[in-house]
Amino acid sequence: MSFTVYIQNQQVYPVNASRLRQAAETVLKQLRTDSPSQLTLVVTDDDSVRRLNLEYRQVASATDVLSFPAGPAPADTDRDGSYLGDILIAYPYAKRAAKRRNLNVEDTICMLAVHGLLHLLGHDHDTEKARQAMWKEQAVALASIGINPAIVDKYGGE
């Protein structure tokens, strides 16, 4: 199947773009094997994420990852609906959180990409049942790219 993962990293944070693509493509192969898919991963600063978090979630602080699903393709365009949306990762925030927990920063960034993409695909962790389903998919994807799924519990939330 055809997957396109765009990476935007205007601040040139030290991320492994190939590994980020691999993380996203692994989730897409796992859950969307029959559908062409496109998404954008934006690696950015805390201030950009803080502004968006306030605007869209009414939370006046930075966070590690935000997902913005694409709306339906307008009927009068030739868009085929394969664009899933955007995932923003606040690199400085994620790096600080990883260092505090003695986690590999690159693995943490990939874990956040997987987590954000699962949100784009409709998963959530707002109930225990939903969290268990999301964590199961997350664990499979992380293990597939060589990241111990225990990183999720070690990372926790801020």
Image (spheres, helix red, strand yellow):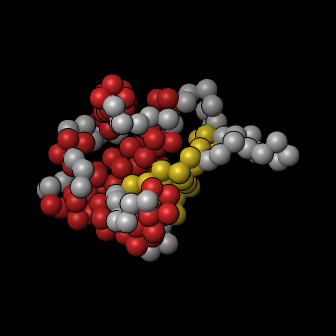
**Residue situated in front as seen by the camera: 42 or 129:** 129
Q: Is residue 101 visible?
A: yes
**Residue situated in front as seen by the camera: 30 or 134:** 134
The image quadrant of residue 133 is top left
Where residue 49 sits in the image (x, y, percent)? 43, 65
Which quarter shows the C terminus? bottom left
Residue at (39% x, 55% y) in the render: 65
Where residue 60 sits in the image (x, y, percent)? 37, 66
Which quarter shows the N terminus? top right
Where is 29 relative to 24, above or below?
Answer: above
Is 11 situated left or right of 109 in this image? right
The image quadrant of residue 153 is top left
Where is 9 relative to 141, above or below?
Answer: below
Is 81 situated left or right of 57 in this image? right
Residue at (45% x, 41% y) in the render: 119
**Residue situated in front as seen by the camera: 57 or 6:** 57
In the displayed orientation, state which residue is furthest to the right: 76
Where residue 155 sits in the image (x, y, percent)? 21, 49
Residue at (22% x, 60% y) in the render: 97
